[in-house]
Image: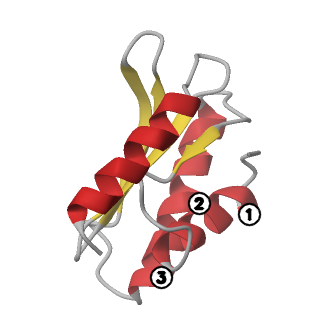
């Protein structure tokens, strides 16, 4: 997948969604090795919670992505965040991105 194509898709997605204090944006970024997720309040430009798989040593990439989703959901619930807007960052909704979203839903986030 070309980076130029992903950035074009990202721009279209970001034009339509925005996070607030009540319903933050769950932004996802994946590299070849790791996956990162953060809940962002776009009104203030502040990251509320974040999680990544950099400290996880075992498991497949998909299992780690699901664990990151669950970890982020637990941190968000601790800050009384129940609903989010999902921003896949221009990545296709499959594989690790889908696993992260399913993990967050499983742990109680609504989107």
Side of 102 relative to 94 (left or right): right
Mark 2 in CB contact with mark 1 (< 8 angstroms): yes
Among the two numbered marks 3 and 2 on one chain, the one whose residue lies closer to the N terminus: 3
- Residue 110 can be seen, yes or no: yes
Q: CA distance from mark 3 to mark 2?
A: 13 Å
- Which quarter shows the C terminus? top right
Instruction: Estimate the x, y position of residue 15 in percent, counting from the top left.
Output: 49, 30
The crowd level at tag 1 (other Cα within 10 Å; few <14, some 14-19, many 20+) is some
Among the two numbered marks 3 and 1 on one chain, the one whose residue lies closer to the N terminus: 3
Residue placed at 66% from the left, 30% from the top?
A: 81
Residue 104 image-quadrant placement: bottom right
Q: Nearer the viewer, mark 3 or mark 1?
A: 3
Among the two numbered marks 2 and 1 on one chain, the one whose residue lies closer to the N terminus: 2
Please give the residue where the numbered disc 3 appears in the rendered image: 62
The crowd level at tag 3 (other Cα within 10 Å; few <14, some 14-19, many 20+) is some
> Residue 70 got which mark?
2
Residue placed at 47% from the left, 41% from the top?
A: 12
Please give the residue where the numbered disc 1 appears in the rendered image: 106
Pick whichever, 11 or 107, lies toward us: 11
Instruction: Estimate the x, y position of residue 63 in percent, counting from the top left.
Output: 50, 82
Above or below, 45 against 84 in this view is above
């Amino acid at each position: 997948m070309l980076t130029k194509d992903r950035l074009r898709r990202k721009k279209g997605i970001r034009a339509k969604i925005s996070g607030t204090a009540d319903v933050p944006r769950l932004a996802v970024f994946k590299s070849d090795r790791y996956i990162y997720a953060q809940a962002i309040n776009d009104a203030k430009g502040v990251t509320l919670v974040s999680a990544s798989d950099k400290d996880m040593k075992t498991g497949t990439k998909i299992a780690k992505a699901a664990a990151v989703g669950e970890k982020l959901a637990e941190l968000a619930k601790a800050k009384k965040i129940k609903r989010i807007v999902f921003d896949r960052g221009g990545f296709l909704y499959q594989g690790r991105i889908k696993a992260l979203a399913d993990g967050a839903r499983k742990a109680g986030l609504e989107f």
